[in-house]
Image (cartoon, grey):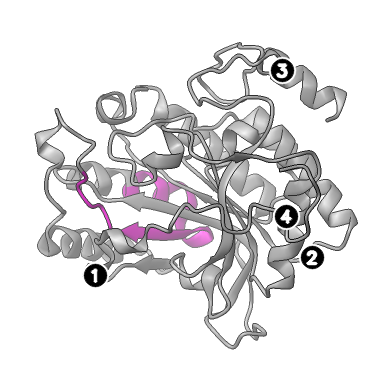
Amino acid sequence: MTQETAALLRCCRICPRECGVNRLKGQTGFCGAGAKIKAARAALHFWEEPCLSGKSGSGAVFFSGCSLGCVFCQNREISANMFGLELPEGRLEEIFLELQAQSARNINLVTPTHYLPQIAEALERAKAQGLSIPVVWNSSGYEKPESLRRLNGLVDIYLPDFKYLSSRMAGRYSGTADYPHWAWAALEEMTLQVGEPVFDNSPPDGGFPAMQRGVILRHLLLPGLLEDGKALLCRVFEQYGNRIFYSLMSQYTPLNHVPGFPELDHRVSPEEYDDFVDFAAELGIENGFIQEGSSAEESFIPAFDYQGILPTKPSGNL
């Protein structure tokens, strides 16, 4: 761990919550993370956008903890309950290289924000050892631009959520009314870093053209928030047009851990989602992905079983 990373963890203000805890001494803030990276799975993942997964899969690393804490989170086992294993020094870059050796299209860092400085170090070491596939930052969008600048030159593709335009809804469902402010600021920094989309039109796995650089903005349509979703698309498209990609998601699935939110006890109807997609097309969005109705099932959630986390060769560290 570098002195720079240690200083950031000593008084943690990596995300907008700015808890100020000393993670080096075992203190934890809202995200639940300590000084060591904790992860629950590292494996080929086939349920991302086709330009990311292709036929060979995206090399997804699922990190434990989360700085946002949405009530409807479908990865709650790892995001809120901190299920996972602590990684010894040097293990994360090994994981990246192992995924590359499995022909992963990219390294897909899932919910990584609260480990940003440690991940940046691991990426630098992995690239020095031969990591050459694109790196995807797959996040909630609740991030500080000054923190994201540490990733400039290390991350090739940003895959942020933009969950709400409404501060009131952000406060109700994610416990932070300032989410829209930070999501806007983060999106601006991300687009500045990676620019307009770049694709490999002849990917080695023969699948959908593989994104090499760019931003894909995700929006998960929630029950009752169709108008908020439309307003969000208007604002984003006005500023970025088709210089970014849009992923319009229909996969919201009500789970048992959201009592007290009866308005979220059902899926978005096909009619609502079709309305949302039609609205996007009328706006002029051409660079986009949509989901089939079958996506709204729990089956796309991977098993958090430590796959790929333990060393392939015994090292005595875990």
- Work out how far the residue at label 2 is from the one at label 1, CA to CA, in angstroms: 34 Å
SS at mark 1? helix
Around disc 1, counting alpha carbons within 10 Å, would you say few (fewer than 14), some (14 to 19), or many (20 or more)?
A: few
* Earlier-in-chain disc, 4 versus 2: 2
Residue at the location (39% across, 67% down)? Answer: 289
From this view, report whether residue 137 is shown above or below residue 20: below
Give the mark, 1 or 3, whose residue is nearer the N terminus: 3
**Residue 135 among those drawn in magenta:** no
Q: Is residue 26 left or right of residue 97?
A: left
Q: In the rendered image, which residue does mark 3 sit on?
A: 24
- In contact (CB < 8 Å): disc 4 and disc 2: no
Marks 4/1: CA distance?
35 Å
Gap between marks 3 and 4, in whole Å? 25 Å
Q: Amino acid at mark 2?
A: Ser
Which label belongs to residue 132? Answer: 2
Above or below for 171 versus 37: above
Do tag 3 and tag 4 residues touch (Cβ < 8 Å)?
no
Q: Which residue is mark 1?
A: 294
Residues in magenta, as a range? 233-255
Query: Label 3, label 2: how many angstroms apart (C-alpha)?
Result: 31 Å
Front one among 70 and 93: 93
Kindly identify the amino acid type of the residue bearing the numbered disc 1.
Ser
In the figure, 222 relative to 79: above or below? below
- Horizontally, residue 92 falls left or right of residue 315, namely left
Query: Badges 1 and 3: C-beta atoms under 8 Å apart?
Result: no
The residue mark sitting in front, 4 or 2, is: 4
- The first of marks 2 and 1 along the sequence is 2
Q: Mark 3 is on which residue type?
A: Leu
Q: Which residue is mark 4?
A: 311
